[in-house]
Amino acid sequence: MSPLPDLSRLCIHTITTKPWAIETSAQKFAAAGVKGITVWRDTLAGRDIKQTGQLLRDHGLSVVSLCRGGFFPGKTATERTKALDDNRLAIAEAHALGAPLIVLVCGAVPGQPLTESRKQIQDGITALLPDCQAAGVKLAIEPLHPMYADSRSAVNTLGQANDMVEALKSPYVGVAADVYHLWWDPALEAEIARCGRLKALFAYHVCDWRTPTIDLLNDRGLMGEGCIPLRQIRAWVEAAGFKGFNEVEIFSTRLWAMDQDDYLKKIVQAYKDHV
């Protein structure tokens, strides 16, 4: 596993420093030596997206991806069509921003069989492929922890995501691997290696799992605060051929409440010490 002597592969999601506007994030990230940014769609509201993308690049930041698309399943055809419309809008936004990738939180419908939701997810991605090709924007299926299988995602393991990638057979579809969702999986090393063989590992997200976790959505830990074997997983990811950014994605009411300048310093130090 290669060392991380600098910040050249550090990307931070705008959601990680949620209290900051995107303009502030751009300025502060760049000043701290961060080289990549993943943009959450809410930060683009009311802005000229193309100009915002240029602003990010003017600060020396690579626009790594746009979050998020997905939520394909629906009980009715009307709901599924509405989801496709929103995903097409996301593709247009990514193109305008200059983001090469959209991360997909795939969705689920409470009470609907997971097998049906997975079929609707695959059908939805298939329907978007012509739009992806026209815009030059790829899609990354992000498996979510099984605790979210009821309503947030019916894709819950890296194996399921890889199966979908294999079935879709498109260079525009791959996987986003987030350690928070996947660290527990006994098949993780083998499935990361499979990602490498498929050339499908498009994104890698890091944070930590706190013990005890007091909120299953908004109590993620800063790297080093929890029990995820971050360096072991990064070794597997790099052995699979991944050379992209290590993206810090943290949802934390606790960390959002602190001074965000101090928090950014902690992110940079935790990245150096634990990723």
Image (cartoon, rainbow, N blue to C red):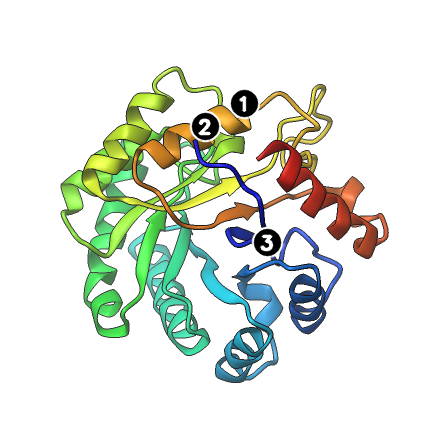
Q: Residue at x 42, y 29 (%)?
A: 235
Q: Amino acid at mark 3?
A: Ile
- Residue 141 is situated, as x and y percent measured from the top left of the image, at 35, 45
Whether tag 3 and tag 2 are in contact, CB under 8 A, the answer is no
- Residue 116 is situated, as x and y percent measured from the top left of the image, at 27, 36
Give whichever of discs 3 and 2 has the lower sequence position.
3
Q: Residue at x 64, y 40 (%)?
A: 272
Q: Which mark is residue 103?
A: none
- Residue designated by label 2: 233
Whether tag 1 and tag 2 are in contact, CB under 8 A, the answer is yes
In the picture, residue 220 is in which quadrant?
Answer: top right
Dot 2 falls on a residue whose secondary structure is: helix
**Left or right of 239: which side holds 214?**
right
Q: Amino acid at mark 2?
A: Ile
Q: Whole-Å distance between the Cαs marked 1 and 2?
A: 6 Å
- Residue designated by label 1: 229
Point out the image quarter for the C terminus. Answer: top right
105 relative to 92, above or below: above
- Residue 227 is situated, as x and y percent measured from the top left of the image, at 62, 20
Q: Amino acid at mark 1?
A: Pro
- Residue designated by label 3: 12
